[in-house]
Amino acid sequence: MLPQNLVNKFVWECHLLLGHVGANKVSETVRRIVFWPCMQKDVTKVVTSCLACQKVKHPPEYLRGELKLILPTRPLQLLSVDLYGPLPKSKGGVHYILVAMDILTKNTKLYAIFNAATPTLVVKMKSFIEEVGRPEAVLSDNCTQFTSNVLQQGMLKLRVVPTTTSVRYPQSNPVERCMHTLGTTLRTYCNNSQQKWRDFLPLVEVVMNHTVHVSTSLTPFEALTNYRSMLLDSRSIPQLPSMRDNGVSREEMQKEVQELVRARLYSAAEEHKSKFKPSKLSRFELGSLVLLKTNPISQLWANVTRKLFNLYEGPYEVCEVHKENCYGLRDCVTKGYVGRYNVASLRRYCKHVVEAVI
Ligand SMILES: [Zn+2]
């Protein structure tokens, strides 16, 4: 009977000799030479602790946090913003689209902008406030334009609170779905003449705001204003209907509509949640060691295929636990802060069991 530490070392050597194959292959191969009780368990323990394998192989299942429903109670309580582009230069030298979507009503404004620089974004936020109203808070992803100090200060000057989603997990920003629609619509109209995208932007905005949203059965325009969308042909401007003459004030009607929207969004989210059963909700504690999904885009400068990059880097130590499945990480050695990440970008790090081997 081999002592446990020798078992570990033996299995580890086999894993290396066999070119980092998985636990099943290692134990099948080892079984031909030698056998001991709990062999499969020992092999699995050693093989899953291989750092090289943890970095390059996909985890058995991606960690997901509980779906977090962001559901404001009134329009313009939370505005979701994002940048689309860079796109080919279009009329007037514009390269990007700033997308601003009200999370409750889904009402969306699209702005063609020259660049993604902070002053441009602040100017457009001012236009939004003039045209639609002042949002209480703005939710954006973590790209540098939105996290810069200058932008944060600019927003606060406009009396808008800036908030961000966790790093490298833009899907938690509700505007993502809207970006997808924007992409498909623009591709549909401009794939033969890409520089003309700006001409189609007003049309895209009208279509987005005056077509029925699946979850609410209302158009975003209806949800926001309580006026009926009359989109008879794709270019028509919506007409204002005559007010319902039933003694109910405009404000009351509007409130009624917004409550309806909220209820419908809520039940749509509940339905989605019941269909999606996360197999494993993950929780990390302070001090947990985790691996972090690498960001291939930042590595694209090198003329190499991203398929060959490590999928994960680390290990890092969890030093903050935020709500909404978000964790702060720091370097295990330098203790330097690495960033704040969504659980979907993390996997649990399995410490190497063979102490002597480096
Ligand atoms: Zn390995």
Image: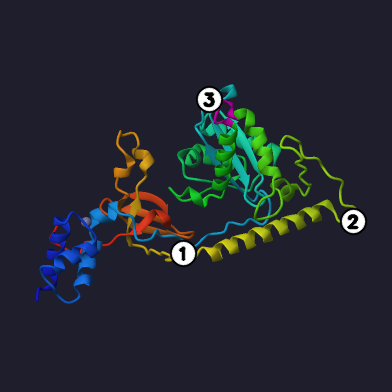
Q: Secondary structure at mark 3?
A: loop
Q: In this rendering, which labeled residue sits more in front, label 2 or label 1? A: 1
Region rendered in magenta: 190-197
Q: Quadrant of the N terminus?
A: bottom left
Q: Which residue was labeled with disc 2? A: 246
| Residue 10 higher or lower than 232, as above or below | below
Give the Cα separation between the discs numbered 2 and 1.
Answer: 47 Å
Q: Which residue was labeled with disc 1? A: 278
Q: Position of residue 88 (x, y in %)?
A: 51, 27
Q: Position of residue 126 (x, y in %)?
A: 64, 36
Number of dots carrying numbers: 3
Q: Is residue 8 visible?
A: no
Q: Decide which of tag 2 and tag 1 comes sooner along the chain.
A: 2
Q: Is residue 216 visible?
A: yes
Of the pair 214 and 120, the residue shown nearer to us: 214
Q: Secondary structure at mark 1?
A: loop
Q: In the displayed orientation, state which residue is furthest to the front.
A: 32
Q: Is residue 194 magenta?
A: yes
Q: Label the magenta part by its dominant secondary structure.
A: helix
Circle 3 packing at 10 Å, graded few (<14), some (14-19), many (20+), is some
Amino acid type, label 3:
Lys
Circle 2 packing at 10 Å, graded few (<14), some (14-19), many (20+), is few
Q: Secondary structure at mark 2?
A: loop
Amino acid type, label 2:
Asn
Q: In the displayed orientation, state which residue is furthest to the top.
A: 92
| Residue 295 higher or lower than 86, as above or below | below
Q: Are marks 2 and 3 in contact (CB under 8 Å)?
A: no
Q: In the image, ligand 1 is in what quadrant?
A: bottom left
Give the Cα separation between the discs numbered 1 and 3.
Answer: 42 Å
Of the pair 229 and 286, the residue shown nearer to us: 229
Amino acid type, label 1:
Pro
Q: Which residue appears at 68% of the width and 55% of the height? A: 216
